[in-house]
Amino acid sequence: MKPPYEITPSILKLITSISEKIGEVNANLLNKPSTKLRKQNRIKTIHSSLKIEGNTLTEEQITALLENKRVIGPKKDVVEVLNAIKIYENLDSYNPSQEKSFLKAHQNLMESLIQDAGKYRSQSVGIVKGLKVEHLAPPFENVPYLMKDLFEYLQKSDEIELIKSCVFHYEMEFIHPFLDGNGRMGRLWQTLILMEKYPVFEFLPFETLISNDQEKYYKALAESDKSGKSTKFIEYMLSVIDISISDLLDFNNRTLNENDRLEYFVSLNKTEFTRKNYMDVFKDISSATASRDLKKGVELNLFGKIGEKNKTIYKLK
């Protein structure tokens, strides 16, 4: 059975906006960010997704763990981060349309944190806020059937991935299939669904925006619970995705130094290019700055130089 939701004018507008931005991302070859940017975004994703669940480690501590250094912090928090690092470094090993892969991911994400990692819950659960039961999840006996139906929707629905990823995220949170780790699994699986169609989502830390204003996230979930359909949550998540892609595209607000620019440009794998091509990527720098960058790139043996002045062509090594 198809999960209930409506396609509103707001959703259509957001899908159009996101699609246009993804086109711009692809046109500028931003779907393969530099190694440095990928690492920064991965750290932000892990930090934000776990912070939503109460993890206290900082981005600096997560960076240290990513670099195999020791950090001082609550053992549970350290284990959560180490598990998440393994997951996000091996995203290609999970198949977003396979339930078996979903359970394996939960097992890896929650290893050494809960007893039944990778298994659906065998007891009833509710989410309590203050003295009020915010959400009473379906009976545990129904979980396997509900999750089977949800994966069938993922596999068979001809709805676009932007919608399907939001629907899956909401429905999974509603079913609450695990005793713990539901929130981080919902966000992880939405990323995987989107990655399959749009590779840039591997490096897009939309969890940061959720983390910065968690009340909106929980409000969207609650409003969808109340209405019995995921429409409000779809609108919320699409707005988060839209802003995240805008941030990625907004290079004018990034302070990149000479080495940052060269590292990023080399990662684009443009085998042959001119100074103009270089300035098309970094639109806020002067021609003199571009010339200095390119001279440094030649000195560092990142690329070779053929010709002089206006006829100069650079070739990636």
Image (tube, rainbow, N blue to C red):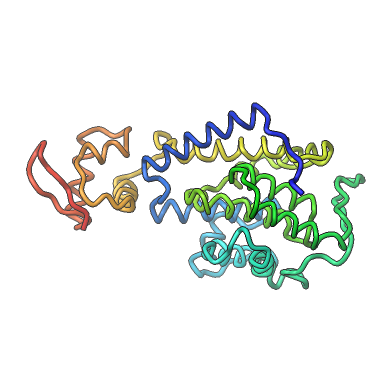
Q: Position of residue 71 (x, y in %)?
A: 58, 66
In this view of the protein, can residue 74 be seen by the observer?
no
Give the quadrant of residue 96.
Answer: bottom right
Residue 61 seen:
yes
Asked whether, in this view, residue 266 is left or right of residue 195, the answer is left
- Quadrant in which the C terminus is drawn: bottom left
Q: Left of 99 or right of it: where is 21?
A: left
- Relative height, residue 305 to residue 87 (above, below): above
Q: Residue at x 32, y 52 (%)?
A: 263
Residue displayed at 82% across by 60% down? 143
Residue 219 screen position, x and y as percent: 76, 38
Residue positioned 10% across, 48% down in the render: 306
Residue 208: image quadrant is top right
The one of 73 and 141 positioned closer to us in this rendering: 141
Above or below, 208 relative to 122: above
**Percent position of residue 16, x then y:** 54, 32
Residue at 70 percent of width and 73 percent of height: 112
